[in-house]
Image: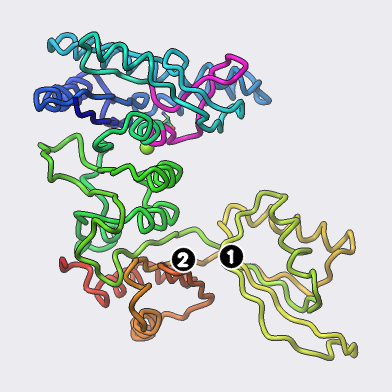
């Protein structure tokens, strides 16, 4: 029989009535002839509560026990979902991660998949069970301990099962009805996309369209798992939501598919650093070691004759999330005190935001950057830093212009119009 993976996020299983609503969607797919693997999250808010309990009990907790506690939210919803399906006369049973077994590495709190052997589930399907309900977000380590995958990890569980069981599709039910051209709270012209490529979704996911865990999209791209994002609160059919798929499946290709943003960015500039081989490594090595996620980097043109010396000097600018500025400053000052770098001063601007346009069409169309910059110029928005990749152009601007910039770019690239 053809097989579907259906994943229900926390808001979709937030109470018993919502679990019944989700189960109705599962029953409909079973009636259409599918075997179904259901992946559930914990009820919304539950994982936060469990994490809070762990921290309160033991601030420097044993990560193995953290996983034992925080994985339990999914155990509850998996059992309740199986019971609800049984009440609807759908043959179903629940599986905790270790029962499958979902084999992972031993990095507690951030484990990665090693293997998902099919034998146990396949045996149940051949006995006539039509639905396997799996507790998301977890697995078992080689040492036999429960592991978790990191927050938002049940999306990744869903994709891993879809790959392991050759599912026709992996449907991610959530509280939004798809992926939009930009955040609808910023412009009412934002339009739901029918399809988007894995690569574009990755750029949008990591830029703050927080619908899918980034790792799940990476995994889907690697195994070519067709992912569909849709709302569990709407009536849905085969055409609902947004399909995240291989770019070969996308006929209509606009140059730009979406405008993403990240509101809380900071810009740091090291003024007058030596311009010599190894200077970038000496700056960005300590930042990486301190866990600072450096994003954009610009090295200015070189000058000479700083303070009478004829050694060349330059300015180095980079961006990182605002809440990492303290850590960045500490790392740079420590490197200066240790003598591995020298700089005249460190300028910090914590009022920045990043706006990006994303689209696979950029590979074959020139002039996207120019259109983007002139749209921003027309609105009087000054650009502080620019960074580009094959399918993305990002600019750092003053935070107070972020909404304006997103709206202007959405208009310029006519994202409100289909095709
Ligand atoms: N319940 C976990 C979390 O809140 C995993 C998930 O829902 O994806 O992070
Ligand atoms: Mg989620």
Quarter of the N terminus within the rendering: top left
With 215 as the anchor, is 312 left or right in this view? right
Q: Along the polypeptide, which appears first: circle 2 or circle 1? A: 1
Residue 207 location in percent, x, y? 43, 57
Judging depth in this view, the residue of 335 and 162 nearest the camera is 162
Q: Is-magenta flag for residue 140?
A: yes
Q: Secondary structure at mark 1?
A: strand
Query: Contact (CB < 8 A) between labels 2 and 1?
Result: yes
With 386 as the anchor, is 189 left or right in this view? left
Q: Quadrant of residue 118?
A: top left
Q: Residue at x 46, y 66 (%)?
A: 354
Residue 411 location in percent, x, y? 24, 74
Report crowding for label 1: few under 14, some 14 to 19, many 20 or more residues within 10 A (C-alpha): many
Q: Residue at x 25, y 39 (%)?
A: 175
Quarter of the C terminus within the rendering: bottom left
Q: Is mark 1 within 8 Å of ligand 2?
A: no
Which mark is on residue 319?
1
Q: Is mark 2 within 8 Å of ligand 2?
A: no
Judging depth in this view, the residue of 43 and 95 nearest the camera is 95
Q: Which residue is mark 2?
A: 354
Magenta region, residue range: 135-156
Report crowding for label 2: few under 14, some 14 to 19, many 20 or more residues within 10 A (C-alpha): many
Q: Is-magenta flag for residue 59?
A: no
Q: Secondary structure at mark 2?
A: strand
Residue 269 location in percent, x, y? 67, 72
Which mark is on residue 56?
none
Q: Residue at x 40, y 33 (%)?
A: 160
Gap between marks 2 and 1 measured at Cα? 9 Å
């Amino acid at each position: 029989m053809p097989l579907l993976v259906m994943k229900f996020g926390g808001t979709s299983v937030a109470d018993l009535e919502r679990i019944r609503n989700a189960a109705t969607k599962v029953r409909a797919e079973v009636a259409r002839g599918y075997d179904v693997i259901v992946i559930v999250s914990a009820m919304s808010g539950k994982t936060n509560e469990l994490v809070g309990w762990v921290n309160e009990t033991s601030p420097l907790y044993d990560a193995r026990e953290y996983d034992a506690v925080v994985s339990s939210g999914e155990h509850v919803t998996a059992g309740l979902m199986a019971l609800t399906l049984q009440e609807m006369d759908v043959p179903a049973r629940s599986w905790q991660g270790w029962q499958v077994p979902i084999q992972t590495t031993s990095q507690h709190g951030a484990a990665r998949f090693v293997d998902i052997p099919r034998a146990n589930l396949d045996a149940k399907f051949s006995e006539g069970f039509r639905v396997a309900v799996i507790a998301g977000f977890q697995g078992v380590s080689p040492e036999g301990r429960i592991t978790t995958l990191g927050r938002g990890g049940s999306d990744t569980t869903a994709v891993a099962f879809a790959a392991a069981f050759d599912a026709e599709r992996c449907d991610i039910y959530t509280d939004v009805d798809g992926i939009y051209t930009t955040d609808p709270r910023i412009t009412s012209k934002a339009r739901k996309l029918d399809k988007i490529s894995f690569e574009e979704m990755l750029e949008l996911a990591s830029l703050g369209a927080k619908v899918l865990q980034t790792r799940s999209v990476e995994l889907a791209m690697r195994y070519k798992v067709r992912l569909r994002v849709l709302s569990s609160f709407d009536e849905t059919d085969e055409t609902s939501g947004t399909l995240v798929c291989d770019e070969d499946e996308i006929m209509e290709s606009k140059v730009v598919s979406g405008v993403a943003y990240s509101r809380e960015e900071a810009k740091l500039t090291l003024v007058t650093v030596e311009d010599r081989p190894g200077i970038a490594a000496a700056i960005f090595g300590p930042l990486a070691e301190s866990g600072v996620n450096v994003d954009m980097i610009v090295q200015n043109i070189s000058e000479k004759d700083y303070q009478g010396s004829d050694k060349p000097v330059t300015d180095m600018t980079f961006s990182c999330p605002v809440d990492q500025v303290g850590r960045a400053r500490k790392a740079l000052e420590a490197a200066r005190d240790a003598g591995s770098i020298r700089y005249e001063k460190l300028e910090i601007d914590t009022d920045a935001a990043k706006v990006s346009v994303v689209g696979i069409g950029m590979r074959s169309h020139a002039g996207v950057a120019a259109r983007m910059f002139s749209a921003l110029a027309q609105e009087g928005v000054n650009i502080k830093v620019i960074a580009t990749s094959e399918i993305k152009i990002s600019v750092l601007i003053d935070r107070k212009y972020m909404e304006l910039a997103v709206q202007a770019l959405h208009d310029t690239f006519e994202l409100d119009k289909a095709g």
